[in-house]
Amino acid sequence: MKQRIEQKLLTNLNLKKFQVINQSHLHQGHAGDDGSGETHFDIVVLKSDFAGQSRVSTHRQINKILEDEFTKNGLHALSIKIEQ
């Protein structure tokens, strides 16, 4: 899952720097945990890579890119952090 997320972000966005962090281990046994260890992720991107876009627009764009991961591949939760 992490590799698919990274590849989709690289393919669809011109990012200078980003991180994809698997946080699934923090949610074991909670809703959305399917036992795969790949259901909850944090993404950290740079604000400068989304110049002129609102925070909401940036989140929508990333969520749209990862739509199949949510609907077909078991991604349950995604946190998007935008850093200076």
Image (spheres, helix red, strand yellow):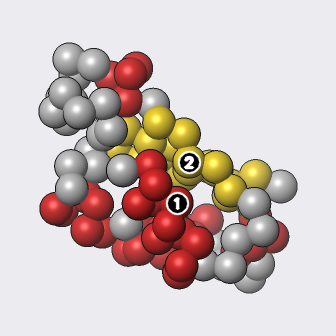
Q: Quick one: label 1, few (<14), some, or many (20+) residues within 10 Å?
A: some
- At which x and y percent is residue 68? 26, 68
Q: Quadrant of residue 34?
A: top left
Number of marks present in the image shown: 2
Residue 65 in view, yes or no: yes
CB of mark 1 within 8 Å of CB of mark 2?
A: yes
User: Seen in the image, is 12 located left or right of residue 65?
Assistant: right
Question: Quick one: SS at disc 2?
Answer: strand
- At which x and y percent is residue 54? 64, 73
Q: Amino acid at mark 2?
A: Val
- At which x and y percent is residue 25? 38, 22
Q: Is residue 27 above or below residue 21?
A: above
User: Which of the labelled discs sits on residue 29, or is there none?
Assistant: none
| Residue at point 18%, 62% (across, down) | 71
Location of the C terminus by quadrant is: bottom right
Question: Quick one: SS at disc 1?
Answer: helix
* Foreground of the two, 83 or 14: 14
| Residue at point 50%, 67% (across, down) | 7
User: Which of the labelled discs sits on residue 20, or is there none?
Assistant: 2
Q: Is residue 40 above or below residue 16?
A: above
| Residue at point 30%, 68% (across, down) | 67
Residue 57 in view, yes or no: no
- At which x and y percent is residue 10? 58, 72
Q: Amino acid at mark 1?
A: Glu
Q: Quadrant of residue 16?
A: bottom right
* Foreground of the two, 11 or 45: 11
Q: Which residue is mark 1?
A: 6
* Foreground of the two, 80 or 52: 80
* Foreground of the two, 84 or 67: 67
User: Seen in the image, is 35 located left or right of residue 27?
Assistant: left
| Residue at point 37%, 66% (across, down) | 66
Q: CA distance from mark 1 to mark 2?
A: 7 Å
